[in-house]
Amino acid sequence: MAGNQEGIKDVAVDIQQVKKIYETKNGQVIALNGVDLQIGQDEFICVVGPSGCGKSTLLNIMAGLDTATQGQILVKGKKVDSPSPDRGVVFQQYALFPWLTVEDNVEYGLFNKKMSRAESRETAERYIRMVGLQDFRKAYPKELSGGMKQRVALARAYAMNPSLLLLDEPFGALDAQTRAQLQAALLQAWEKEHKTCFFITHDVEEAVLLAQRVVVMSSRPGRIKSIVEIDIPYPRDQATRMQPHFAELKNEIWSQVYEEYLMQVK
Amino acid sequence: MKYTKKRNIRIPDYIYGILSLVIFITVWCLISSSKAGKIFASPIRVLEAMQAKIENGDLTRHTTASLYRALMGFSLAFMCALPVSFLMGWYRPFRLIVEPWVKFIKSIPPIAYIPLIIVAQGIGTSAKVTVIFIASFLVMVISIYQGVVGVDNTIIKAARVLGDNDFKLFYRVIIPASFPHILVGMRLGMSAALTTLVAAELTGAQEGLGQMIQEASMYFQMDVVLLGILIIGIIGFSLDRVIALLERRLTGWQETRKV
């Protein structure tokens, strides 16, 4: 059930033969070994794979925070070579500025845009409401729970209005209940705001719940093992997990990830 | 069976502060009333010495001289330590060149190079300021540098992704994120300044608390010696409190453990 790469009409992201080699004391480590992937406009992609398969490396290269040893990534036809506000990133460790309040955190990047103060305040306020933190706009990160911090990080990324949103295991550190709430919030935002999402996770169920296509990566050196189309219609919610087809897809992806895990152990 | 409500009255912190002071003075009295009393003057004798020194203007003269030197050396050191430590944290070549010097001079006790500076600059104020400058500069550079390199990498990444260039990143992220370390550096630098101040004054000065102690010890006026020690302690303690207050105002956003 591999998704065909040729069928994408509006290509938002074009990953071409990306290779990443790290030089270490013990010689070369090939983190990514020729990754090819095309992502459509407004598409939701989830990437799963065993740890150390280079998923985060790929995301960092897409963000412009790291460079590819070979190959290139085009976003809307332009080559990625440095970070850009057009590509938002949400990190697993929240990465909030602890000396700023919630609203100042959300507003942070807007200062780098040509925007009046009133306009940026208003934009920040809108996204604080989107993630349901209007009662905490004056709070500092240390006063927030993990789930709330990640809501702030989501609002901060959305406020920049990027065309591409890169999420690096954003809910990995949260408990199951909080994670479910944030998955719902993210799905809602995605259906409303239409952004291309590239979401890394180690949780196969999360991937099936969120994505239109799930990319399974092989163990190191990282390559794309397969792409699974998730043909479950949106809107999806927690009840979607109960569908037999959901379980089928989950099992299929999980067995592929497990296969790679076994390869790694050997 | 009788149920008694457990009364949970929290004793305010200042009560403990007073208690701490009372115990301190009691122990002092006990020591001075023992055999050691000949050397260790009682609080009353120290108070009398203080009154005498205030009346003839000695105390103000010595204290101002010392305070001036300490604050002067400290402020100059702080102004130099900030850019140097930020450069060290930001530019690798600069760090690789400068760090060995800092570590090397830091390992030398100031007492060892005080004679050299006195010969070069005389026994006036400038020599003391130089000594204090060196000692407190080195302490602050190391501490602030730790803060600059310790800034969380993901926060830096986040700022870059949100559109910060190098310059903006520096003053919007690196500086505020290093604030806690800057203040810790200030506290350490201040205490280094006072330590070396006394060392510098003991080796030769016309005025200053260290000189007052030195002179009094020659005439075996142990009450004056104790007075000098006490005032240096009070100065150090108060300055530390001032910086602590600053710390609370400026870095309240930090996640700290409460005891």
Image: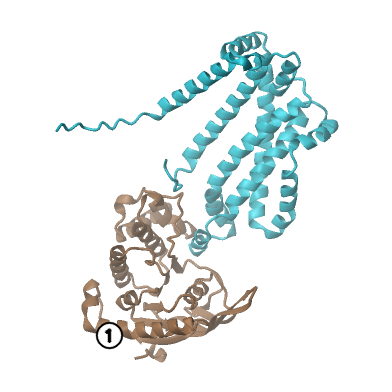
Chain colours: A brown, B cyan
Identity of the residue drawn at 67% across and 34% down: B193
Looking at the image, which residue sits at the far left?
B1
User: Which chain is indicated by disc 1?
Assistant: A
**Which element carries disc 1, helix, strand or loop?**
helix
Q: Nearer the viewer, residue B130 or A190?
A: B130
Residue type, label 1: Glu
Identity of the residue drawn at 59% across and 52% down: B148
Identity of the residue drawn at 66% across and 53% down: B87
- Reply above or below: A164 against B182: below
Residue B90 in the image: state x and y as whole percent: 64, 56
Quarter of the image with the N terminus of chain A is: bottom left
Q: With B117 as the anchor, is A69 left or right in this view?
A: left
Looking at the image, which residue sits at the far right?
B119
Residue A250 in the image: state x and y as whole percent: 31, 81
Residue highlighted by disc 1: A248
Residue A118 visible in the current orientation: no
- Reply above or below: A256 against A54: below
Identity of the residue drawn at 54% across and 17% down: B30
Q: Nearer the viewer, residue B38 or B232?
A: B38
